[in-house]
Image: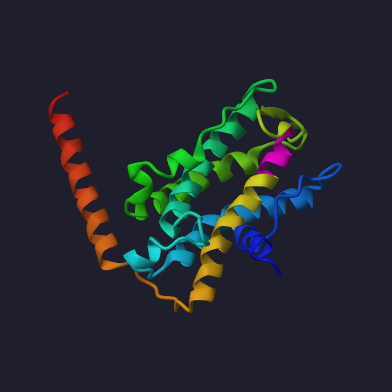
Amino acid sequence: MTQESATEDLRYPVGTWQRPAGAVEASQRREWISQIADAPAQMRAAVAGLSEKQLDKPYRPGGWTVRQVVHHMADSHMNAFTRFKLGVTEEEPTIKTYEEQLWAELADSKSAIEPSLAILENLHARWLLTLRATPADAWARKVRHPQWGTMTLDELISQYAWHGRHHVAHITSLRERSGWTAKTQPSRKNRKEWALRKTTAKKSGRQAHRNR
């Protein structure tokens, strides 16, 4: 195996996304929705107990750190949630892309991961309500993606079902290669940082309420 092919294997541990061919069966759609439902818990389990040093380790040479992967998945799925709702409510809307490489270099992508884990859990809870309530005849509705072209809603959720597994596997495969044992608690520094942020947010909220 060449160095290039080895890097590609690390980049795509569950393979690349394959666009569905032909009509999508309801059973396949349910499987994709199930994968989307499972993604937040799988990501939380993948990073459980990692130290700050481990969170800042790239999952592959030249790749994002574990921390950046977590924040990227939250960023990406917030966009996915909006894209899906646009597709349900508008006629073939053009959806906007974003500079994910630049987003990954912003300050919030190098901060504590708990907010992004919470975003994934709460975002997916809402997204699933919409996915499970979407009628069968709506899945053929389309959005227009600048890179992928016209996509049906079936194709969109297929891509994001893969996307969650893709990034979880970046972390679990790194843990396996590195011999990192699984733990059940986040690092002490990460817990302290997140607790401080929550306290500050509560104080700011109370102050804003008094100023109304």
Q: Is residue 212 magenta?
A: no
Quadrant location of the C terminus in the rendered image: top left
Q: Residue at left 13%, top 26%?
A: 211
Residue 78 in sight in this render: no
In this rendering, position of residue 5 left or right of residue 114: right
What colour scheme governs how the chains and residues are painted in the rendered image of this protein? rainbow
Q: Nearer the viewer, residue 58 or 115?
A: 58
Q: Nearer the viewer, residue 163 or 157?
A: 163
Disc tally is: 0
Residue 179 in sight in this render: yes
Q: Residue furthest right?
A: 22
Q: Where is residue 207 shown, x and y percent of the image? A: 14, 34
Q: Where is residue 202 shown, x and y percent of the image? A: 20, 43
Q: Residue furthest top?
A: 91
Quadrant location of the N terminus in the rendered image: bottom right
Q: Nearer the viewer, residue 12 or 81?
A: 12
Residue 51 in the image: above or below residue 196: below
Q: Nearer the viewer, residue 195 or 180?
A: 180
Highlighted magenta segment, given as a residue range: 150-157
Principal secondary structure, stretch drawn in magenta: helix
Q: Residue at left 48%, top 47%?
A: 72
In this rendering, position of residue 205 left or right of residue 182: left
Residue 142 in the image: above or below residue 6: above
Q: Where is residue 198 shown, x and y percent of the image? A: 24, 49
Q: Residue at left 67%, top 61%?
A: 14
Q: Is residue 151 magenta?
A: yes
Q: Residue at left 79%, top 45%?
A: 20
In this rendering, position of residue 104 left or right of residue 90: left
In this rendering, position of residue 143 left or right of residue 109: right
